[in-house]
Image (tube, rainbow, N blue to C red):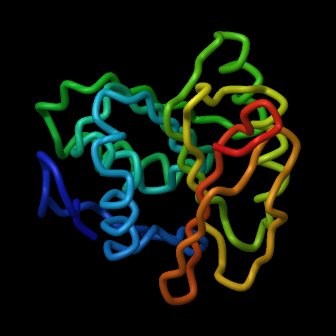
Amino acid sequence: MRVTGGKYCGHKLLGPSHQGLRPTSDMVREALFNILGDTVVDGKVLDLFAGSGALGIEAISRGAGSVCFVEQDHRSLRVLKNNLQRFSDITTEVRVFPADVFRILPKLSQEEAEYDLILIDPPYKANLWLRILQNISQLTPLSEDGLIVLEIPRYNLLPEELDKLIRIDKRVYGDVSLEFWKYKTNGVDN
């Protein structure tokens, strides 16, 4: 695994050392951040189910203003923290929450934290995609013009709309699908 673009392009990242951690491939990460382009620059990013931290670190490399990582598995946290330590000159504000995503979201909402980009890559076997989208919709941790990127297996079908959210794009890379979600605007999508 390596950082695919930005300030730290080409730097190696530690991969998973235990079963159950399935990091986003370099190819999919590169495609995602090429799609996002400059929207990441100076943005506030939330990396849920962060695992090794590859997605959030990619955001840091590409100029995010702040990145908040949420991961509860102690083995994944160790990999994530080791990966962050590889970059001693990070100027981006970084926070790491060793917590369950569904417990931390209400706390972040109480802090009135709003994120410009929320990256979601939960364990596939847990089938948490609808639940996490519903939580985000109800707790509003996404800025008004913010974007959610959800990584799911290609053949999983989610509705086009869910509560206050609407899917605006879907890209398929092999067995992986990236879905892009936003808040609806006055009942109409953006």
Pick out the residue farthest to the bottom.
Answer: 174
Q: Measuring 69% from the left and 71% from the top, which residue is drawn there?
A: 124
Residue 154 sits in quarter: bottom right
Does residue 6 lie above or below 1 as drawn? above
Q: Position of residue 177 (x, y in %)?
A: 58, 75
Count of numbered tags: 0
Q: Position of residue 118 (x, y in %)?
A: 55, 42
Q: Position of residue 120 (x, y in %)?
A: 60, 52
Residue 32 placement, left or right of 47: left
Q: Measuring 72% from the left and 12% from the top, which residue is drawn there?
A: 110
Pick out the residue farthest to the top.
Answer: 111
Does residue 56 lie above or below 128 as drawn? above
- Is the C terminus in the top left, top right, bottom left or bottom right quadrant? top right
Q: Position of residue 164 (x, y in %)?
A: 82, 38
Q: Measuring 63% from the left and 30% from the top, which residue is drawn there?
A: 142
- Is the N terminus in the top left, top right, bottom left or bottom right quadrant? bottom left
Does residue 88 lie above or below 11 as drawn? above
Residue 26 placement, left or right of 95: left
Q: Nearer the viewer, residue 39 or 4?
A: 39
Residue 123 placement, left or right of 1: right
Residue 43 placement, left or right of 46: left
